[in-house]
Image: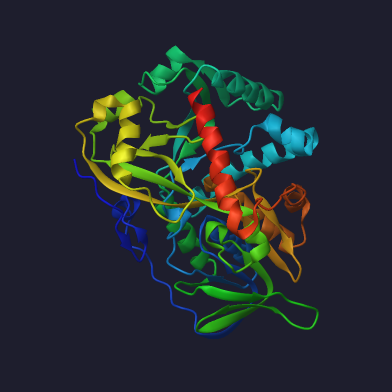
Amino acid sequence: MNLLPQIESEFGPQSYYLDSASPPAFHPRLEGSHTCDVCVVGAGFTGLSAALNLAEAGYSVALLEGERIGWGASGRNGGQVLTGFAPSLNKIEGWVGEAHTRQLWEMSLEATQILQERMARHRIDAEYRAGYVLAAVRQRQMKDLAEEHLYVSRLGYDQMRMANREEVRTLVNSERFQGGLVDMGSGHIHPLKYVRGLAKAATQSGVRIFEQSRVNAIHPGNPASRARAVTAAGEVQADHLVLCCNAYIGNLQREMRSRIMPVGTYIIASAPLGRELALSLLPTNYCVSDANFVLDYFRLSADWRMLFGGRVSYTTIPPAGLARRMRQRMLAVFPELRNTAITHAWGGFVDISMNRLPDIGRLPGNVYYAQGFSGQGVALTGLAGKVISDAIRGDSEKFDVFARIPHRPFPGGEWLRLPLLTLSALYSRLQDLI
């Protein structure tokens, strides 16, 4: 058993994704002064989607990335392409009403379609597989899953079904689960291959990508001047700025930062299991999440490894003994893997909003932004890029649906919001055990 610590490289932690993807393309650092129609900050799923949509519509676009393509959450995540949102639709309806909830649901379906259309159009081999199980660890969770199924059924969605304990066992061969929701409109991908494929498509469409070009300051536009994004070695002047920094916004825009919280999440990869053993555990090769607040999520890779994620941390420090603890969680689901080596352990940060819904909007001075995808970003980020692109082009109908969602700063200010969130998370973890 090889329980490796996280090993950092210029591309992020040395993950299974890095070791299984082809060599990356390299993009220059920004130097000097540049002008364009739109400057996008952050080259993850969101920023690349916005840049690609805008370039395809004829805009000149510069995209600034502080690290390398895929360095952040877009190149490290669990790869689950999911319909819907982190909160239940019933909860969302209580916040925004039935009509608004229906619009959001329909756009979440559009989000998964955008991803698949991008892969097809640009020939991105991101290893997409359809099928997702949201599995109940406790019987009481089945009631909530049934309510979600009833809601989407009323909306005309026929790709989701309830599964009892016996049927879930044919999908996830584990004693741990009591039943669940099966969604064939969701699936899983190799996220690093996808984000690099988006970058290639964006470059071919005319986007100028600059890596290792961290934006240190932004200056919104006004009637007399363009907006500016400033790095250590240069700047970009543009008619519009689009901020797609998510968990890595830092101090670039304090108002945005107050409405999100970076949360660490972690993944291990097993040694290759072989097709027979792998499919004995996940016979249909669907991806899986459990229904706990602090959830586990897992799937098979194309070379028949178990990729198993979970845990959360609210600090910038990975938990001690990360691989060992993650392995224990994996064995609680699949004890058959007790003699299987762990070859990779890595993690990173996603950003959550207070209500766990995406925070997409506009700041004064022609500055657009998207953040707060709360663990649902593989699909929703592509949608965010499109609706921001549409808004810049003059069609703000879908953008306005997201902009109407009420978002509040995390309570406690700069110093107390983390302790308060930690206490709230502890309460939710205790609820998982009941």
Q: Is residue 233 above or below residue 248?
A: below
Farthest residue to the bottom: give it. Answer: 32
Q: How far from the left and from the top, in percent, is residue 69? A: 44, 63
Q: How far from the left and from the top, in percent, is residue 308? A: 36, 38
| Residue at image point 62% right, 64% down | 243
Q: How far from the left and from the top, in percent, is residue 215? A: 55, 74
Image-quadrant location for residue 33: bottom right
Q: Is residue 406 left or right of residue 277?
A: right
**Count of numbered circles in the view:** 0
Of residues 321 and 393, the one drawn nearer to the viewer in this rendering: 321
* Color style of the picture: rainbow
Which of the image's four quarters has the N terminus?
top left
Q: Is residue 398 left or right of residue 180?
A: right
Q: Is residue 286 left or right of residue 339?
A: right
Q: Is residue 431 above or below residue 294?
A: above
Q: Is residue 291 visible?
A: no
Q: Is residue 49 above or below residue 232?
A: above
Q: Is residue 318 above or below residue 423?
A: below
Of residues 195 and 2, the one drawn nearer to the viewer in this rendering: 2
Q: Is residue 266 visible?
A: yes
Q: How far from the left and from the top, in percent, is residue 128? A: 43, 41
| Residue at image point 23% right, 39% down | 272
